[in-house]
Amino acid sequence: MGEYRLETDLDPEIERLRADILERRWAGEVLFFVRRIHADRATSNRDIADAFVAEVGCSGLGKHWLEIDRQEALWVLTRVLWGDICYDVSIMTRDEALNLAARFTSLFNDCTFFTNGTWKKRVIPLPDPVDCLDGFWPITQVTADTGVVAVGADRIGMLWVKDED
């Protein structure tokens, strides 16, 4: 792997966003990290994502990272912030979750987004269809974890939720 280094990002919006997410996403454990990155662009974004998540105490996924576009990243984050991963219980409104997800994704320009799982609609026994995690490669040691890692030109970040059954 090529070389890269991370630095603290002093943008005050990052701390405001972290506080807003932690205030509203009260169930499970939120992992929220954003850093400035200086990387040898010969280094693959998957390798950078692996090294970054390892630095914050998680496991890298290598070839198992699923690359997604910005719209998919926004959708995954909205779903993860909106409700409990294991039980599909609402934690905040979808509008609140979408706003927080949009604020996170807007931090990154010229970016590759990664996640660890796929989703499906669950209709029964719930009265309304709910998107639930269908399959995933865990990066933590809990029952379910998912979110988005963003590797941008000058910034790297992670918004992830760990939920227990």
Image (cartoon, rainbow, N blue to C red):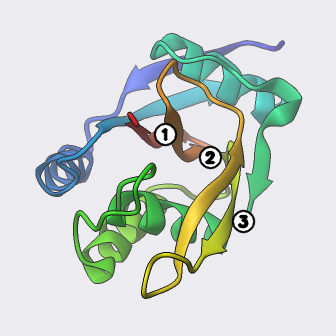
Q: Mark 3 falls on what kind of element?
A: loop
Residue 96 in the image, given as x and y percentages of width and height:
25, 75
Q: Earlier in the sequence, mark 1 or mark 2?
A: 2
Pointers 3 and 1 in contact (CB under 8 A)?
Answer: no
Residue 139 in the image, given as x and y percentages of width and height:
60, 25
Pointers 1 and 2 in contact (CB under 8 A)?
Answer: yes
Pointers 2 and 3 in contact (CB under 8 A)?
Answer: no
Q: Mark 2 falls on what kind of element?
A: loop
Marker count (numbered)? 3
Q: Residue 152 carries which label?
A: 2
- The answer to whether 76 appears left or right of 120 in the picture is left
Measure how far apart labels 2 and 3 are at the Cα level.
Answer: 13 Å
Amino acid type of the residue tagged 2 in the rendering: Gly
> Does residue 86 appear anywhere in the picture?
yes
Report the residue marked by disc 3.
Answer: 69
Q: Residue at x 22, y 53 (%)?
A: 25
Q: Which mark is residue 157?
A: 1
Residue 131, above or below 12: below
Assign the N terminus to one quadrant of the image. top right
Measure how far apart labels 3 and 1 are at the Cα level.
Answer: 15 Å
Assign the C terminus to one quadrant of the image. top left
Amino acid type of the residue tagged 1 in the rendering: Gly
What is the crowding at mark 2: few (fewer than 14 residues within 10 Å), some, or many (at least 20)? some
Q: Residue at x 41, y 70 (%)?
A: 102
